[in-house]
Amino acid sequence: MKTKGLMGIGTLIIFIAIILVAAIAAGVIITTAGVLESKALNVGNEARERLVTNIEVVSISGADGSVGNNLENISVTTRLAPGSPTIRLNDTVVTLSTSDFSSSYGYDAVASTTTFNVTIEYGDSNDYLEQGELITMNFFATRPLIEDEEVIVVVQSKSGGRNFKIIRTPNIILNTREYLYP
């Protein structure tokens, strides 16, 4: 009888040890699942923001400055794409490219040869582009756009996608302002 009692106590000790190991393993699994869920939510939010954050180009126009019939003053009217969060204008870049040159413009309150300024068409006058606002980005092309020239205009925010339009200037530029897109 003494053997059976010792065997029962040994089995009970092993059983308790198995339960403790299972409880510890379950705790580790639950903690790991919580961490993975948190990381997955963060990655999902970042991916959604990158996919959704976008600036829509509404129209593009060019104005004749002082050099012949070339378009020197470029205006790109934009708004946020549906579902896009607010975008800082300081984090936005407009790139103008042709077959022989490319230049990029960042935001500044006063347009120069390397920056664009903003005219508020609809909305508040601050340094952010918010839902429901319509703004026009104005800049001076580093090289005037000539007649019948293919131009690529790219508007890109730091936190999101890029929106580009391939346009062609008119065969003959007669007006002081030419609408290039749409």
Image (cartoon, rainbow, N blue to C red):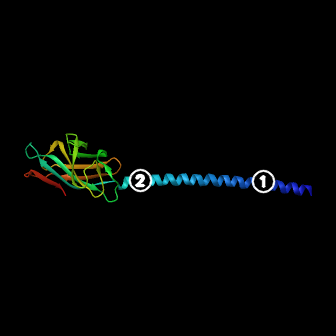
Along the line of sight, the residue nearer the viewer: 143 or 57: 57
First reached walking from the N terminus: tag 1 or tag 2: 1
Residue 30 located left or right of residue 89 = right
Q: Which residue is drawn at 49% across and 54% down?
A: 40
Residue 172 at x, y = what percent? 9, 52
Q: Is mark 2 on a helix, strand or loop?
A: helix
Residue 27 at x, y = what percent? 63, 53
Hey, what amino acid is under mark 2?
A: Ala
Q: Which residue lies furthest to the right in this view?
A: 1
Q: Residue 47 carries which label?
A: 2
10 Å crowding of disc 2: few (<14), some (14-19), many (20+): few
Residue 14 at x, y = what percent? 78, 53
Hey, what amino acid is under mark 1?
A: Ile
The residue singled out by tag 1 in the image is 14
Q: In which quarter of the image is residue 99?
A: top left
Q: Residue at x 10, y 45 (%)?
A: 65
Q: Residue at x 41, y 53 (%)?
A: 47
Spatial separation of the CA atoms under disc 1 and disc 2 = 49 Å
The reply to whether the C-beta atoms of the residues labelled 1 and 2 are less than 8 Å apart is: no
Q: Which residue is drawn at 40% across and 55% down?
A: 48
